[in-house]
Image (cartoon, grey):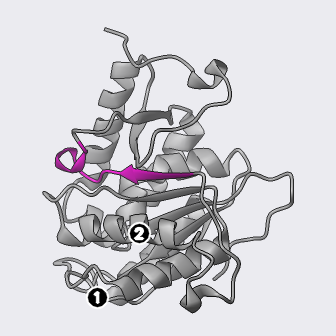
Amino acid sequence: MKPTPTSRTDPAPLLAFGAHPDDIEFGCGGVVALETRTGRAAHFVICSRGEAATSGTPEQRRSEAGKAATLLGATLEWVELDGDAHLEVRASHAIKLAGIIRRVRPGIVLAPSLVENQHPDHARLGRLVRDASRLARYGGMKELLEQPPHSIAQLLFYALTPESEPSDITPVLMDVSAPEVVAAWTAAMEAHTSQVTARNYVDLQLTRARLAGQRAGIGHAIALFPNDPPVLNSLAQLGHSARRF
């Protein structure tokens, strides 16, 4: 499924990659809810059907992912790479993902962090998306000549667990405190019934968001980790700092 076309005045789409059917929702679903409620189109790319998981069948998880994406106002597509728990970093995979970037033409790309101490598919997909974001802008890529090159504005990594948060990157804290945003995010996570009945993933993510929010003096926040330093046109874009204690 392709994302809904946007007009010239709409912000460039948000493109989020997940290794498994629930990664985007648990890792950065609040950010997606925040962005779609301000008029930005969002598109999910899921790179396995979660077939290696202890809980839930691939068919069930596919259905759950479709429901969750709808709750967040996003479209989604499925990409077959090596399968759940078998993902490898290959040039052919990066080129395939670069083709998606060229087709969707996003402004912002979200991907799992590169930290090794997590499900191996997460870190490997993060690396593939990082490589794909570069390849998407190379005009001489013969495999991608059907679509014009595209340069994204920013690649941001999300962390699914505290252990997968990069220690060497200062995060951008996204304020997701609005009640309607928290409600949509919570509903999207709860749509993954096969997973949340096995472990209390929803409470984990909301607790992490509350802690990040406390740090910044707000209700809930999600940390995103820039691949490159953001460039601002004005100091007014900085907002306030997270130093509240």
Q: Indicate the quadrant where residue 218 lies.
A: top left
- Give left or right: position of 6 versus 32: right
**Which label's residue is closer to the chain start, 2 or 1?**
1
SS class of the residue under badge 1? loop
Q: Most extreme residue toward the right, as rendered?
A: 8
Up-down relation of residue 234 to residue 167 (above or below): above
Query: Disc 2, disc 1: CB below 8 Å?
Result: no
* Residue at the (57%, 20%) spot, across then down: 239
What residue is shown with label 2? 131
The amino acid beneath tag 1 is Gly
What residue is shown with label 1? 83
Q: Indicate the quadrant where residue 69 lies.
A: bottom right
Q: Report if residue 15 is visible in the image.
A: yes
Q: Which residues are magenta?
A: 154-166
Front position in the image: 25 or 12: 12
Residue 159 on image: x %, y %: 30, 51
* Residue at the (36%, 72%) spot, across then down: 128
